[in-house]
Image: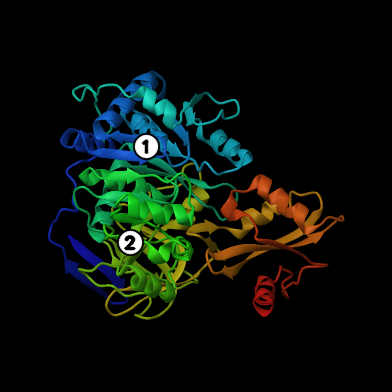
Amino acid sequence: MTWATRKKDKILTREFTPDSWKMDAVTIASAFKAAAVQSPDAIYCKSATGALTYEQAAGAIQSLANELRADVQGRSVALILPNSKAFLIAYFATLFAGGKPALINHGHPPSTIAKLLGDLDAAIVLSDREQFDCNTRILNDELVDSLVNPADMSTLIDPGTPDDIAAIMYSGGTTGLPKQVPHTNAAIVATMERGDWGWRTRADEIWLPVAPFTHIYGFLMGLTNPIMRAGAIVIPERFQPDLIVDMLANERVTIFGGGPPAIYQAVMSSPKFADAQFTNLRICPGGGAPFPLDVHKRWQAATGLKIYEGYGMTEIAPISINTEEYGVKPGSAGKAVPDTVIEIVDLETGDTVLDTGEAGEIRVKGPHMMTRYTGNPEETAIALRHGFVYTGDIGTLDEDGFLTITDRKKNVIFVSGFNVFPREVEELLLTHPAVSGACVVARTHERSGEVPIAFVTLRSDIDAASILAFCTDNLIAYKRPAEVIILPEMPLTPAGKVDRTTLQASLSANT
């Protein structure tokens, strides 16, 4: 097993000794079953409604899988659920029934969910609410408890193969709706292994995930990696800093799936944080957005623990991780995970590999990378070239192989670890009958990293509050502009395009 970071005219490599981060299971469902067989009485998941052991969860999964099997074999199943016991049971029941789970963010507005479902052709929707005209199976934590029956492990059969789709995830697009990213069992197993290589786990871990299970980071921290060693998943009802502080202490959490810097900043802002004792906490992963050095310093000073920052995306994750064994460099995204190549290439063509220290677009390849965007050959051709995923992020590699993210190539706005593509918000704004022009840029934000700011011109009289209300009705929370600024006209470049740079600079001048 090798670590590889490719630079101009040379490749840095290091041999890895096979270790506990490698899995015996070849599918996600078989990994869960192995945990349930080995540790039936261990707590699997716990929410405000109570806990399920691995055996109880297996019983609920078997009951639901038996109910679904005739309708879902070989077909997509939409999961539209908040982080919950119900989400976990629905996901594994779909796999055991032979279906393909499609993970749709529960926070999307109804209009977006309707469009995503229209492109999916799902056999059934598993959700806590009726979804339009779709065949919906209502599911929540209370209903999951009613599905718990004694599990028969001899008949809990995983029909999946390494090449079968184990998760359909969604990645933000430069235009239109989020793109479908199908991942096979083999790819997700490889992802799990590389996550565990970076954030080494043990038996009897207690995980506290925060990011949505539909997000690649939340998926790994809350759904897949805990089952590798029969860990327990403690699920907060919501992200509220005081609640998270209490849970970290009272639930004896050992792994905090915090995610982007905004989460850590919010936790440290809680009045309860200063006096809290996290005596069991030992691993604090970070990802989703670059971490300011101040966040690293404050967290370590308060807890005595490092944040092990990594880098990944829906298309391939993790890409790199800071690790105690192979090196930690605060402010960087760490070194490439095993069997993964990172290259920095020129921004114009993406074909020339740059020298050490030069900034360019980050492209990566590894066994856990995506193979396509379903039904979207144009975007696939942009993202996948020469056997690499082109990330759209700009970064540098140093002599030791540490990757540092310095910028975004396509004006992507990072909001609490989520990618917000300005054009998507702009296109929505232009559907408002009073809006004649729109340009969305980023403004730095202490908690979120960045927030979208919308500049608009009008064709009829309306106030900014009404436009913000329109965005609230049509966009998931992290995509909504933090402010709408009405202009008499848009500044233009000599080529007649909206001068995004001037608008961005006007925000800086007024802060």
Would you place residue 332 above or below residue 63 in this image?
below
Name, please, the residue furthest toward the right: 461
Q: Quadrant of the N terminus?
A: bottom left
Q: Which of 142 and 57 is in front in this view?
A: 142
Rendering coords of residue 201 (x, y %): 22, 54
Would you place residue 369 above or below residue 124 in this image?
below
Q: Which amino acid type is shown beneath numbered disc 2?
A: Gln
Q: What element carries label 1?
A: helix
Q: Residue at x 26, y 43 (%)?
A: 227
Q: Which of 509 and 457 is in front in this view?
A: 509
Rendering coords of residue 454 (x, y %): 69, 62
Name, please, the residue furthest toward the front: 275
Q: Nearer the viewer, mark 2 or mark 1?
A: 2
Residue 398 figure quarter: bottom left
Rendering coords of residue 400 (x, y %): 27, 77
**Residue marked by disc 2:** 277
Residue 320 figure quarter: bottom left
Would you place residue 252 above or below residue 163 in this image?
below
Task: Judge left or right: residue 400 versus residue 404.
Answer: left
Task: Judge left or right: residue 246 versus residue 465.
Answer: left
Q: Which residue is drawn at 67% across and 70% down?
A: 500
Residue 410 figure quarter: bottom right
Q: Which of 461 and 265 is in front in this view?
A: 265
Q: Is mark 2 on a helix, strand or loop?
A: loop
Rendering coords of residue 91 (x, y %): 37, 35
Q: Residue at x 18, y 48 (%)?
A: 203
Q: Give the label on residue 88, or none.
A: 1
Tell which circle, 2 or 1, labels the residue nearer the N-terminal end: 1
Q: Could you classify mark 2 by the number of other residues whose Cα lies within 10 Å: few (under 14), some (14-19), or many (20 or more)?
A: some
Q: Could you classify mark 1 by the number of other residues whose Cα lies within 10 Å: few (under 14), some (14-19), or many (20 or more)?
A: many
